[in-house]
Amino acid sequence: MHGPLHEIGLVEVLQLLGRGARDGTLQVVGLDPAAPRTVTLSAGRVVSVEPDAGEAAVEQALVARHLSGTDTIRPDLATESRDAMQLELAMRTLAAMLHWTRGRFDFAEGPVRDGPLDIAVDTILLELVGRESRRVELAALLDDFHAVPIFVADDRLAVGAPLELDPLDWRILDAVDGRRDVSALAGTLDEPLETIGDRVRALQGATILELAAAPTNNALAARAAIEAGRYDAAVTLLEHRVGSVPSDREAWRLLGLAEVGAGRFDRAIRAWEAWQQADPSLTEEAGALIAAARTMLEALHDHRE
Amino acid sequence: MATPEGPEAARIAALRRRLGAASPATLTNFAWFAARRGSDAAAIEAVREAVSQPGAPRAAWQTLERLVTGRTDGLLLTPASATRHAPVDISSGASALAAAVAAHREGALAVAETCYLAALAVSPLAAAASDGLAVLHEQRHEQDAANSAWQRAIAGGAPWAAHNHALALLRRGEVPAARRAMAQALTTAAPAAALYALAGYAALLDGAAAEALSSLEVAVELEHDLARAHFTLGLAHDRLGHPAAALAATRRGLLLSPWYLPQVWLLTPVPGSPPVELPAGSERPGASDGTDEVLLALGRSLLETGHLGESLAVFDQVLVRDPAQPAALFHRGVVLAKLRRYDEALADWEAVDRTDPESPLGAMSRRHARSARQLAALFVARAG
């Protein structure tokens, strides 16, 4: 069984394989042909997702989460923590793959060896639907994830019931800087938005964090200013925005545009570099704009000389 | 040492107050947080408290080691479930023996003695209590009292009495007597891995590396996770000139424990339960000469098998604790020379020559240093 993803989505493919209790290897190629994913199924249940939820990826994820080290001496991490990490990586990868509409899949039927996972396809789909729903609920509670967590005052922090925080809570507390919103925290910690949203609310309930209102988003006004040719006004609005929410990628992009409009290519390059940094997946797009701005800058420079 | 000031320090202090009498895992994680926020002193205080509690996770020990050597990189978080050893219950309902072992492990010897004496009066606990009492006397250098307590413990069938008695003999320097006692104990039905491990260690101390090897191989076969047996096995292979096998055994040991503690008293908190291990002869884990010995063997094995980067890190680790350790300096010099870092190699060999000129290592270091000087001069000439 094989075909392009724009004709039959992975949800349908997985459901077919799951209900048919099939054994085999499903290879999926998305936008990047150099990065195929391999989902192994045994009796219609997902038993491995490679390479994203393979052993190396799990170890890497544990190191990134400060739960394991690169030293020879490893912490005495319980097996269930590794298993939970592996499951989470698999679910995340599958969630991303299920949205792919470009690329193709190939299913090769045949006997497979047992893998580290054992997840029914219906469980995967229900879990992903559950996560999406939770995300929508939390978006309403957390100002579309733009609420900014901050520590409560020290006198309130010191009192209250004793705490048992888990490692993710500590990582959140470490990343809280009074500037990052919930969305930026999720990006920084490489965790799902709904997971971070849930933990932030729990920390709020434990009187450790409180939520500052989302800073006013000047992006709309700035866009209108750019369209009206009022570039300096747009720059002022956007600088204010990126100062309060440095993770706002769109604001950095617009700031670059406004600077170009004002003829300040050097400042446009800086804005777009920040845009690129805020979202490395945009390297190509931002890189092209930066190159163009640089060419203009050089041209202007040569002309002036 | 970094110390934050103002609001950050106040926040860390407030959070610490909030945690109260926290679990070792929570204290370890707080230490991670405090260290990342620059409050090393608060971090060290918390992690010290963590390691002083039963069941402290390995991450706590690793954090402590890094922080006390001035490092804040590579600190770890730990889930609550990482704790591998359940603490001994010393609540009011617990037996006198369990309370004795808990107090003994915490170093509260007077309390432990009182509890052991109480346990002696309870028939099913008496043999194990005698064994614990014997260990306690041995720690206080009361050898006669220890010997007579061990006689009672062995006669009563205390499970670890033969092991502990042999360890006491070893520590008193009576290696042949210890080996004889263990040889006899090993003839009994189903001896434990710990006894084979100790027998292997004693054989190694006695210069009988081949005998050590066979005992230790049995020990690791019986109990795959017995870290000290793997470490000692690594040393035995090292002595027998098997670098690859030494490396494999030592790495296995390191996966199981950061510390090489070859001498461990085994105490019984509840008859029939697994023993509680009490490191002998060192106030804190990692401070023993045994660890350095293992690290040196590991470093040599890594060097001989061409793992230069890892080897360098291992010798560095020894030299952090003892900057003048001649063998570590000598071998680090060799690694650095292989990496063509001749100036640094030269510095290490010159250090050995200064600190230990009469030893064979000193003589070799002088020869090596001469070569390194020549090579360094070549590089200078080429650069010029």
Image (spheres, coloured by chain):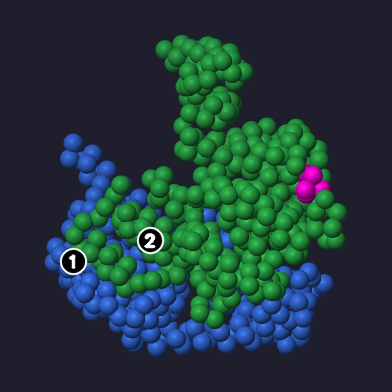
Q: Is residue B319 above or below residue B166?
A: above
Q: Position of residue A51 (x, y in %)?
A: 63, 63
Mark 1, Cα crowd under 10 Å, few <14 / some 14-19 / many 20+, is some
Q: Report whether A40 appears left or right of A274.
A: right
Q: Chain of mark 1?
A: A
Q: Residue at x 38, y 61 (%)?
A: B46
Q: Nearer the viewer, mark 1 or mark 2?
A: 2
- The chain in blue: A
Query: Residues at marks 1 and 2, common chain?
Result: no
Residue B49 image point, x, y percent: 41, 61
Q: Residue at x 41, y 65 (%)?
A: B27
The residue where tag 2 is placed is B46
Stretch in magenta: B179-183
Q: Colour of chain B?
A: green
SS for dot 2: helix
**Most prominent secondary structure in the magenta stretch?**
helix
- Residue drawn 61% across and 82% down? A124
Residue A187 x %, y %: 40, 67
Residue B384, quarter of picture: top left
For label 1, the SS is: helix
On whether residue B21 falls in the magenta region, the answer is no
Task: Compute the Cα span from label 1 to label 2.
Answer: 40 Å
Percent of width and height locating residue B55: 53, 65
- Tell me the number on the disc at residue A216: none
Question: At x 26% / y 52%, what residue is drawn?
Answer: B3
The subunit carrying tag 2 is: B
Residues B187 and A133: in front is B187
Q: Is residue A29 among the parts visible in the rendering?
A: no
The answer to which of B266 and A89 lies nearer the viewer is B266
Q: Which residue type carries mark 2? A: Ala
Say the numbered circle drawn on residue A240.
1
Q: Quadrant of residue A48?
A: bottom right
